[in-house]
Image (cartoon, rainbow, N blue to C red):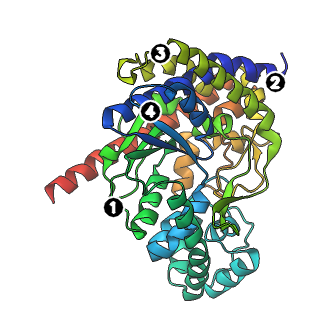
């Protein structure tokens, strides 16, 4: 079977059913909460939007589906003008293959500015050196106390602010209607960033968000405004252990370049400005999109006109489809999807394979093991774990000690999410007693 045949088969049997049921849940929750417009956030929201338009057509009550052209970078950069030094937490985020150059680019700095900022902060780390989590933490306070760096951040943020505010107003976010956002999820940070930007323009209403899954939430938010379908912040540890958010983003993205910012036309309209598209994944994305649209049309013919009367598929049933695909993929699935290109950085620089196959470097696969993570956290590992974005896919593609490697990855994930659950319980009790 050719890789694209595997993509087509998986899209029809797993990906499309998961996405369509998720969108049904979004519309059902919107009806329950009295929300009458949903903004699906680019680009993870593209296939959700396509399915939503089909499923919501001629339903009661009427729920309008819109697609908001945005990205983490396009919304975060202008918000730095409002957050001040609080924005450093979003600039110095950890990730895969993070370098100082990538970190400073998140704040809008070009390479020459990044060199100047590093020099002003007294940092001699090369811009292209891959950093460990500990190195990122050590660098962060140096830039916190660096006035030239903040002058550059403020300059770029202020330039971007009028465009994003104009675009959001143009797209109806200030209309007198209850609306919510929908996205893939993971941290819910874009919902909080939107809130910051809109409040600057005088918008002070609640914003609800619908997400496939949530690992954590921004500090200080109202948790009841963040709604998760497949796994919430608390609990569902097994689902999280057999889930890959990187793979989810890879297969459900929009086949177009990311939104870099906004510009005003001569006619006074605000239009998105796109970065050049990395088109390696487009053939697979078109296949998945076709499967989602086709299934949404089939479902729409059988659904009652009243959204309240819809019968929803419990997320637990979809776990039987999704968990084996993501957590224990077949060799064909691992090759077909693992060869897709992926980057988790906000500026989406040219990435690498989602699940690379290491050659003579067992450290790559050990990056997901509990012991390696512990050593790295204790600064006993000599270099950052060489992580695959979809570790399970790399293990299966490599084909050596597959069962043992997958078991070790699962052990690490269970330990990670159990630790986070215990931490939330402890911190929650401390807040209650204070």
Q: CA distance from mark 4 to mark 1?
A: 23 Å
Examine the image and state in which quarter residue 313 appears: top left
Please report the residue visible at 71 percent of the width from the left and 80 percent of the height from the top: 113
Mark 3 or mark 2: whose residue is earlier in sequence? 2
Is residue 47 rendered to the left or right of residue 186? Answer: right
Q: Is residue 251 above or below residue 70?
A: above
Query: What residue is drawn where x is 63% and y is 25%?
Result: 292
Contact flag, marks 2 and 1 (Cβ < 8 Å): no
Residue 241 lies, with reference to residue 345, above or below; the image says above
Describe the element under mark 2 as helix, strand or loop. Answer: helix
- Circle on res. 3: 2
**Marks 3 and 2, how far apart at CA:** 34 Å
Q: In the rendered image, which residue does mark 1 sit on?
A: 204
Query: Which residue shows up at 64% across the image and 80% down it?
Result: 123
Question: Among all residues in the image, which is located at the extreme left?
Answer: 433
Who comes first in sequence, dot 4 or dot 1?
A: 4
Question: Mark 2 or mark 1: which is in front?
Answer: 1
Residue 121 in view (yes/no): yes
Question: Which is nearer the N-term, disc 1 or disc 3?
Answer: 1
**What secondary structure is found at the residue carrying circle 1?**
loop
Q: Earlier in the sequence, mark 3 or mark 4?
A: 4
Disc 4 is placed on an element classified as helix
Q: Which of the 4 quarters of the picture holds residue 390?
A: top right
- Mark 3 = which residue? 303
Q: CA distance from mark 4 to mark 2?
A: 32 Å
**How far is disc 3 from disc 4 in space, using C-alphas?**
15 Å
Q: Which mark is residue 94?
A: none
User: Distance of mark 1 from mark 3, alpha carbons?
Assistant: 36 Å
């Amino acid at each position: 079977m050719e890789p694209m045949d595997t993509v087509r088969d998986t899209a029809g049997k797993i990906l499309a059913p998961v996405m369509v049921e998720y969108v049904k849940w979004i519309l059902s929750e919107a009806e329950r909460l009295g929300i009458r417009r949903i903004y699906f956030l680019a680009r993870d929201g593209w296939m959700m939007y396509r399915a939503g338009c089909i499923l919501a057509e001629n339903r009661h009550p009427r729920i309008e589906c819109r697609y908001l052209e945005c990205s983490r970078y396009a919304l975060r950069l202008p918000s730095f003008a409002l957050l001040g030094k609080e924005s450093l937490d979003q600039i110095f985020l950890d990730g895969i293959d993070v370098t100082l150059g990538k970190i400073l680019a998140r704040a809008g700095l070009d390479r020459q500015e990044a060199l100047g900022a590093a020099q002003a902060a007294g940092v001699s780390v090369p811009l292209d050196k891959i950093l460990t989590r500990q190195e990122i933490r050590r660098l962060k306070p140096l830039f916190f106390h660096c006035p030239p760096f903040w002058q550059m951040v403020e300059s770029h943020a202020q330039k971007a602010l009028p465009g994003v505010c104009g675009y959001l107003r143009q797209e109806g976010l200030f209309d007198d209607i209850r609306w919510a956002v929908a996205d893939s999820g993971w941290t819910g940070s874009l919902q909080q960033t939107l809130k910051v930007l809109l409040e600057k323009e005088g918008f002070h209403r609640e914003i609800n968000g619908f997400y496939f899954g949530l690992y954590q939430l921004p500090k200080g938010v109202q948790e009841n405004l963040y709604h998760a379908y497949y796994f919430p912040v608390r609990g569902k540890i097994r689902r999280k252990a057999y889930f890959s958010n990187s793979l989810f983003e890879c297969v459900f993205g929009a086949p177009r370049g990311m939104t870099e910012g906004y510009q005003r036309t001569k006619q006074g309209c605000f239009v998105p400005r796109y970065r050049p598209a990395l088109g390696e994944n487009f053939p697979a994305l078109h296949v998945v999109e076709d499967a989602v649209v086709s299934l949404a049309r089939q479902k729409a013919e059988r659904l009652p006109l009243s959204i309240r009367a819809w019968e929803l598929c419990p997320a637990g049933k979809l776990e039987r489809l999704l968990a084996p695909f993501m957590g224990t993929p077949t060799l064909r699935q691992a090759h077909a999807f693992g060869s897709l290109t992926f980057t988790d950085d906000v500026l989406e620089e040219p990435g690498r394979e989602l699940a690379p196959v290491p050659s003579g470097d067992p450290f790559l696969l050990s990056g997901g093991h509990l012991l390696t993570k512990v050593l790295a956290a204790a600064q006993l590992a000599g270099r950052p774990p060489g992580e695959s974005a979809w570790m399970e896919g790399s293990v299966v593609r490599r084909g050596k000690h597959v069962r043992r490697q997958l078991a070790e990855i699962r052990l690490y994930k269970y330990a990670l999410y159990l630790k986070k659950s215990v931490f939330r319980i402890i911190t929650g009790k401390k807040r209650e007693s204070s």
